[in-house]
Amino acid sequence: METFDLLMQGFSTAATPINLLYAFIGVLLGTAVGVLPGIGPAMAVALLLPVTYSLEPTSAFIMFAGIYYGGMYGGSTTSILLNTPGESSTVITAIEGHKMAKSGRAAQALATAAIGSFVAGTIGTALLVACAPVVVDFAVSLGDPSYLAIIVLALIAVTAVLGGSKLRGFSALGIGLAIGLVGADPVTGQQRLIFGQPLLVDGLDIVVVAVAIFAVGEALWIAAHLRRKPMQTIPVGRPWMGKQDWKRSWKPWLRGTAYGFPFGALPAGGAEIPTFLSYVTEKKLSKHPEEFGHGAIEGVAGPEAANNASAAGTLTPLLALGLPTNATAAVMLAAFIQFGIQPGPLLFDSEPQLVWALIASLFIGNTLLLLINLPLAPVWAKLLQLPRPYLYAGILFFATLGAYAVNLQAFDLVILLLLGLLGFAMRRYGMPVLPLVIGLILGPRAEESLRTTLQLSAGDISGLWSEPVAVVVYIIVALVLLAPLALKIIRKRRPESVLLGNVPQTPDETAATDDDGGVANGYANGDNDSDHDKEHDKDTGSALPEHAGSSGGDPAEPAGRHRSDKIQNERERS
Amino acid sequence: MNKLVSRLKGRSELGLAALLGAFGVIVILDAMSLNVPYSQTDPVGPKTLPYIVGALLLVCAVLLAINVLRGGHGEAEGGEDVDLTHPTDWRTVVPLLGAFVLNIALIDTVGWVISGTLLFWGSVWALGSRRYIRDAVISVVMAVGTFYGFYLGLGIKLPAGLLEGVL
């Protein structure tokens, strides 16, 4: 019951007028950035970091939490009305959601998405309340060797499991770790990688790096490939659902929640895999399988719930262990560091007021989101008409302003530009940015744990595996690294391209990967699924609409369908 | 020679591999230049992690180069407003970078209101808007608005520069 009391105290902090105001601003901004193309919750929080310096940390985090949850709601609106999912987590929603919208059922699609998000977000947050203290109790008993092992697992899992090419993921991780090295070494004071620049002694400001990679890199990349033709938005009235829709939606909501939360809480879970699994499950269990591919409401309800539950799940490792598992969580962790709050298992003890107010605000924000999303969906859809030059110029403008405001020195803007160009190049060459940011944030903490560990063991390297938990975690790390490799070697006898972490290159090869993607087990499955989703994300522009109508019985169908689009795209290009 | 050129064509990703390799070398050289006596209380020392990171970068650079030479390529990232069917539009990107660099050069001397106006107006122009008057008005409003917003709301005094005394 102690937890309950703490939560109630959290509510009393979060429900003060000023914090309610920040929660409201957060959900409004969150929905807006979710709807707007080219800007997501991670970028929004990064851009707001400099502005929130002077705020109470509690208020700032209440606002960030609103942005995080709001982005999920807004993202589904775009995928349903426009068929262009902004976040990879709403890719699956677009498949059935856009079909529903096209056949005149946009209102019902939006309604099941919003209500499902609310149900899943509320249950997910309740699970967070139940799980986080347990995880904390376990985590505080761990010593540095185990903590180091868990950080290593988080780094490897984010890099190896998510994304298309492991090689490119590890390259990004290396760059992130290298950026994290810049500055004076905390133990000896030795200056690393500062090239004689006194301004670099304190290290690169995490805010500047986050803004550069997420905002400047993204804006430049979009500017280089800006879609000149306006996209067709489906007009929509006020969302509502009939009795039949409710009947068909509530079970997928619950099942989606059950998928989403655990995957979100895993070190490399993310929202892509559970939304895909939820889609496949609903398709199998549906009483109307023939509607899938033509706008089945279950195909919107399930993945949308999974998506929001995973957002709640992600907060468990973030708050209980200080481990971010997606981009927004990474930026929020940077915010903790910015405010001088030490993230990690002790957070619940050292900052109970902040943590519980944050969790309480999630319940409040989720309710606010339902209230502003259901009646106002048509208004939000209007945001899509914002002229693109203003949108992307605005992102650059606020990125510059924010990075400059941190220290009021033009030198930071040079760093912003250089890292922005790096972010541009990474997007151009398919190098994921998440491992970079996670490496940057977790690298210094891994080093600290490593040094404490070996200090305790007096330099004996066996100190690294001196705790049973550490041994178990290293075994999991080995499995994450080796299992997909081993499975692929056995299946395809194409070891060389696997070793290189290769993305399949020819249409034939990709098709072959698809066939066994849907039914495999363990990490290999997760790996393949996330590949699908990422692929989806890649060229959704012209991909889904034309082909989404074809139907088939294969669970990996959306991906397979998509591959054919890819082939077609490639033909058009050549 | 021609053979080499044809092999390198369309393999600009090799530049990225070279960059990774350069990062790796820099990280390792920098770590080697550190001069730390062995310490009982810190057996790991400040050099260990840079060596690990440098090695990781070098290995990735080599593997990436091999991968690209064998025909592998990273997939460009898609997005809502991204149309990958046309090549990189340098006529948008270069002026955009120009506006950005101009702001860096000017912000400390002429102040945020002027440099920010130029930044926004230049970016909007680079991105293809041609409604000069409306764009200019919005640019000025944005720059002045953020100047006072930061000053009054956050207590951050952005440089006033040439307009010192006016604002």
Image (cartoon, rainbow, N blue to C red):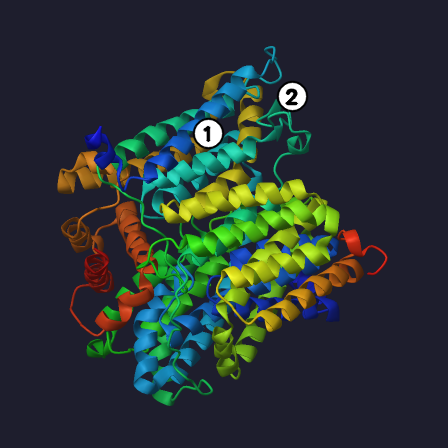
Badge 2, how many Cα within 10 Å: few under 14, some, many 20+? Answer: few
> Residue A391 appears at what percent x and percent y?
53, 65
Q: Nearer the viewer, residue A533 or B2?
A: B2
> Residue A341 appears at what percent x and percent y?
67, 45
Residue type at the position of mark 1:
Phe
The quadrant of the rendering that contains the C terminus of chain A is bottom left
> Residue A360 appears at what percent x and percent y?
62, 64
Q: Is residue A77 visible?
A: yes
Kind of element beneath mark 1: helix
The quadrant of the rendering that contains the N terminus of chain A is bottom right
Q: Nearer the viewer, residue A102 or B21?
A: B21
Nearer to us of marks 1 and 2 is: 1
Chain letter of disc 1 in the image: B
Q: Is residue A298 above or below residue B68?
A: below
Q: Which image quadrant for residue A255?
A: bottom left
Tell me how many marks there are: 2
Residue type at the position of mark 2:
Thr
